[in-house]
Amino acid sequence: MAQLNRVPVREQDPKVRARNFEEVCYGYDEAEAVLEASRCLNCRNPRCVQQCPVGIRIPLFIAQVKAGKFAEAARTVARDSSLPAVCGRVCPQETQCEGSCVLGVKGEAVAIGKLERFVADWSRAHGGVPVEKAPSNGIKVAVVGSGPSGLACASDLAKLGYAVTVFEVLHKAGGVLQYGIPEFRLPKERVVEPEIDSVRALGVTIETNVVVGRTVTIDELFDREGFKAVFIGSGAGLPRFMGIPGESLNGVFSANEFLTRSNLMRAFDPSSDTPIFVGRRVAVVGGGNVAMDAARTALRLGSEVTVVYRRTEKELPARAEEVHHAIEEGIDFRMLTNPVAVLGDGNGWVRALRCIRMELGEPDASGRRSPVPIAGSEFELPVDEVIMALGTSPNPLIAKTTEGLETERHGCIVADESGATSRPGVFAGGDAVTGAATVILAMGAGRRAAKAIDAYLRG
């Protein structure tokens, strides 16, 4: 009979990690991975595979880990995922593969994510595994954006023999993996860079500092550069604000800017020249993963941090693991609280956040109970920095410079299940289509689009 409880994962002590940017979770060693893999029931109908957006053959790679065949497990994972070390760290397995694990009914689900991370880390430490690739067909395909969807699409197309060029607007490839996710969750030099190098090893060319829509347009990629298809995986990097009084005060930031300065431009590193404002008391508005990342980054920079969220902890959209880590580290949560104004000190700087207490009313269209203000419950929360983590939308530049490319009212590109857009030969996926979502969902969209592009180019 399988063990109901999973093998614990070693982590940094909360008091220690709250003051450094080293990775929180240490992951499994070989013995721990084999022990955890032995819990898998190897179901005849593996629902975990059905719930994996990129279709990793989970029971097979776990059985290989159980047998100590780590190289074979790495090859199995690599067939379907171009970013296994990333996904093993940041994907919400608890609502996807692990959420459907039979063992989770009476006990704890198999730690699929931690096992995927182990396999990827082991493979990297042992020189990686060769990936099968078809002979080059010479057909050029452009990929806009080097985030998860773009890298997944580029990888699959390269494996099929296409000549793929990825165009990235920033000076480093990786998209949200570089600018959005903190070092303590996703180390850049040790994890992200090697995974991107593995995509390059397939023959993919990555050109940075290219603003598609300015440096070159989609039409020019077809007409002047000779590309036969284009995939748009440009993400959703345009931040949203609340539209309340005082948001223009000094000390109010979007989570995107705050995290980009810290992550991509390494403002957390004392040797970096990148400036970053560090408030003594910081309020982070929002309850998603980005809010947790911003709050935990501000804490590590030396701030006292309060997360302000208008629903209860039960409704927090962030991963349970990230919320748990934030609470362990000493971050304060003000639930059922909503900002109504940012207050200034008379010199143009933030001094407080005026909030109102909320209660949950009837469910909204998504089924979540709508928060309703409690009359007369306003109060001031003394802070000198406010970070808005309220979601993002796609940058409109590509849509505005691409004739015939249909978008919806929020600026997202309209695409079908395969990624096909209103423009023949132009495909799209990830956050540029759905709005801000998860790494693994973006990768799944990139893989589907690669398959559709292949079918399109084959006529």
Image (cartoon, rainbow, N blue to C red):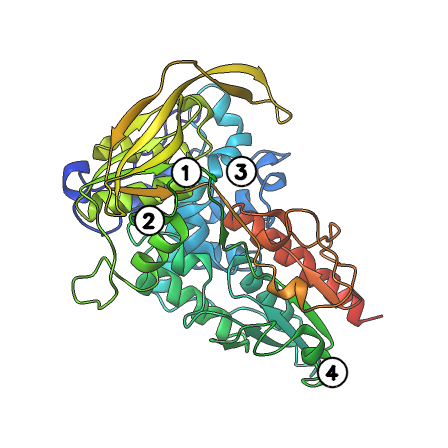
Point out the tag, 3 or 2, that comes first from the N-terminus: 3
- Tag 4: residue type? Asp
Q: Which residue is mark 4?
A: 223
Point out the tag, 3 or 4, that comes first from the N-terminus: 3
Point out the tag, 4 or 2, that comes first from the N-terminus: 2
Please name whichever residue, 374 or 199, is drawn nearer the observer in this view of the structure.
374
* Other-residue count near label 1 (Cα within 10 Å), few / some / many at <14 / 14–19 / ≥20: few
Which numbered disc, 1 or 4, marks the residue closer to the eye?
A: 1
Do labels 4 and 2 touch, CB within 8 Å?
no
Q: CA distance from mark 1 to mark 4?
A: 47 Å
The vertical placement of 420 against 66, above or below, is below
- Can residue 24 be seen by looking at this rendering? no
Which numbered disc, 4 or 2, marks the residue closer to the eye?
A: 4
Q: Which residue is mark 3?
A: 97
Instruction: Please state the horizontal and vertical placement of residue 121, each as a whole percent of the image.
Output: 36, 57
Q: CA distance from mark 3 to mark 2?
A: 20 Å
Q: CA distance from mark 4 to mark 2?
A: 42 Å
The vertical placement of 136 against 268, above or below, is below
Q: Which residue is mark 2?
A: 185
Which numbered disc, 3 or 4, marks the residue closer to the eye?
A: 4
State which quarter of the image contains the C terminus: bottom right
Q: Which residue is mark 1?
A: 245
Instruction: Please state the horizontal and vertical placement of residue 224, each as a whole percent of the image.
Output: 70, 86
Point out the tag, 2 or 1, that comes first from the N-terminus: 2
- Tag 1: residue type? Pro
Tell me which residue sits at (47%, 34%) in the image: 94
Q: Secondary structure at mark 4?
A: helix
* Other-residue count near label 4 (Cα within 10 Å), few / some / many at <14 / 14–19 / ≥20: few
Point out the tag, 1 or 4, that comes first from the N-terminus: 4
Q: CA distance from mark 3 to mark 4?
A: 43 Å
